[in-house]
Image (cartoon, rainbow, N blue to C red):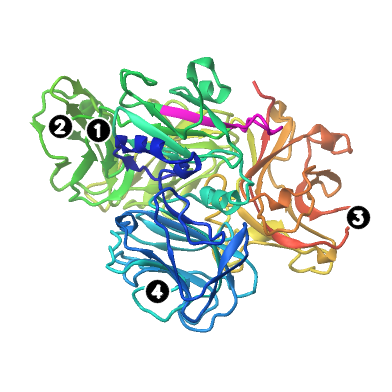
Amino acid sequence: MFRKLIYLSSFVFVLCLVLTSIAECADPGLVAWYRFDGDALDSSGNELHGTEMGNPTYEVGVFGQAISLDGDGDYVDCGLDPKFDITEFITVTYWIKVVAFDRGWNTVFSRGDDSWRSSRAGENNFMEAAVGGTAGNWTYGVTPVDDEQWHHIGWVYDGTMNYLYLDGEIDATEENSGEITVSSFPLYIGENSGATGRFWNGLIDDVQIYNRPLTQEEIQIVMLSSAGDYPQAAGPVPADGALHADTWVNMGWRAGDFAVSHDVYFGDNFDDVDAGAESTFQGNQTGTFLVAGFPGFAYPDGLVPGTTYYWRIDEVNDAEPNSPWKGEIWSFSIPPKTAYFPDPADSAESVDADVQLGWTAGFGAKLHTVYFGDNFDEVDNAAGGLPQGTLTYNPGTLKMAKTYYWRVDEFDIVETYKGDVWSFTTQGAVGGPNPANGAVDVTQSAILSWTPGFGTSHEIYFGSDASSLELKGSGNLGSESYDPGQLEWDTTYYWRIDEADNANADSPWTGPLWSFTTANFLIIDDMESYNDLDPADPASNRIFNAWLDGFNNPAINGSVVGNANPPFAEQTIVNGGLQSMPMSYDNAVGKSEATLTLTSNRDWTVNGVNTLTIWFRGSSDNAAETLYVALNDSAVVNNDVPDVAQKGSWNQWNIDLQAFADQGVNLANVTSITLGLGNMSNPVAGGSGMMYFDDIQLHPPAQ
């Protein structure tokens, strides 16, 4: 679930070679970096050095030293360099330690009061960030920071959202759009250059400014990396998953903290790059960039439109025993020659009857031919249409509750490229399929449901052959669900709901064709079924009513499942799908655990499954407690990593089911699963924290 960013490359990046050190070109998006290790110099290589104003001093910081500002005239003037004229995307990260919030809007940094800044949120004890000129200017945090402790703040504007991070975790978000105002005021650190007198009273350390949006993982890397704690490469450019609109590329990255050189792998096959195949190895180098798609470089004939490329950076330091550090696999794609990004999106529902169609032109396309109709085969086989130069098409007023198909062929002066057939359904038709259309890894015991359209009755068609669906039943308005029974593993199923209303002349209505694919594993709980409905509602399924915690028995169980307010299931910090389970723990009482009683999928021997997989995520602020899982309230397996609760990213825990069988569990009849922190059998008082759990699954042996 990423946004597609189009990067129009420039060979200017090669100029990074002239910088004086590898570290200075570690991230091409880094504009300025103020370490405050006894001075206000810029460590980015861009020479954007600050000038100390007033009488700031330097004290022990998070990393090295930090600048200490007394709130009475001390600040740093970083000037008006055009590099600070950031208009599209921005990230600023910094460490702060508040001495006193002694006035409204105590400011950490400010490019005037009309551009980008971050400060105390008015008279509150939490932080805010702002991007002037955009639709959603201000973003207020929610967590107090005036506790005389160091806190890391990360603030990101990515063109659609503001994100405010506190100590590596999301503290607040705000929808936003538009271009950032370029201020006539300089950048100040510790004061507002456009609304003076808002001095910072406290310490500031390690201010980093980027002209690109960093991900949460990158924010966490920045938070750790100045301490020399992050050995992997990070900050890929193009961004991971980006759409790159050119047939050559210059790739860059931020070096790991211990790296002396870099092993670079690049190719168009994920598995080959992952395995470090010889064909993908581009060599060991000291620079943090790689050019491809030019003669003399990788892919000398150019990158191929419609192709996804994968790359990996392994960091090397022969003096370190843990070297090399294998990097993550990143990717970017070259746009296809065919049209893409249809508007409405493919399979869109409830589309207005007066819709205007649009799309993104294929790579190099000059002319476009549109085919439109209500029959898939006719649209797919159509030919001889009239080309046009525009990227929109008006099909006229359409019928309600009807599925339409369309195709765009692209011509680049040399060749015509036939497009995919897209579809959409106008308002009044059935919609909202659950599982979602095209969903994968769906449980084998799925219950199908949908949102009704104009009809008062419906017929259900279902099967594994899209061309010959079977009529499975019928029903009336108010009964929009169907249980197909136990489904096969790793199988694609198709279904359609046709509606009728004898009082409507346009009846009946043939519904759109939907599909989903079942998982090749057994889903115990993916956290997707939980909702926030009132308990009196028969459809209510609140997460803490399924996973029973210590809320009603806090003297012996320190866990609390779910957020305090709706949505009770976590919808931002997720591993897969749309939700995860948040669980706070307080082991002052010895242990914290939550238990799910299984009403289905109790046979843990089907299809030869032998591994229980649990995805979890902790936080660096958590107390280091043992993570455990128990079956049937008896057999316990502990995670053997002592600080596992402090892992601030998603982790996969694989457990051999034999470990439970050896403790007497009948794997053919598992009645409950418990997730906990501490010592289940011998509770000992401990610390507290917050954990997230997701995607609990059973897997067969790897093929």
Q: Secondary structure under badge 2?
A: strand
Task: Say whether marks 3 and 2 touch (CB < 8 Å).
Answer: no
Looking at the image, which residue is at 48% across and 40% down?
21
> Would you identify the image quadrant in which residue 532 lies?
bottom right
Circle 4 Cα neighbour tier, 10 Å, few/some/many (<14 / 14–19 / ≥20): many
- In the picture as drawn, the residue positioned furthest to the top comes out as 278
Circle 2 Cα neighbour tier, 10 Å, few/some/many (<14 / 14–19 / ≥20): many
Circle 1 Cα neighbour tier, 10 Å, few/some/many (<14 / 14–19 / ≥20): many
- The numbered mark at residue 368 is 2
Please provide percent x and percent y for residue 278. Answer: 53, 15
Q: Secondary structure under badge 1?
A: loop
- Amino acid type, mark 2: His
Q: How many marks?
A: 4
Please provide percent x and percent y for residue 436. Answer: 45, 43
User: Is 368 placed left or right of 648 in the picture?
Assistant: left
Q: Secondary structure under badge 4?
A: loop
Pick the front one: 577 or 114: 114
- The residue segment tinted magenta is 309-326
- Amino acid type, mark 1: Ala
Mark 3 highlights which residue?
Answer: 682
In the rendered image, the vertical position of residue 165 relative to residue 486, given as above or below: below
31 in the magenta segment: no
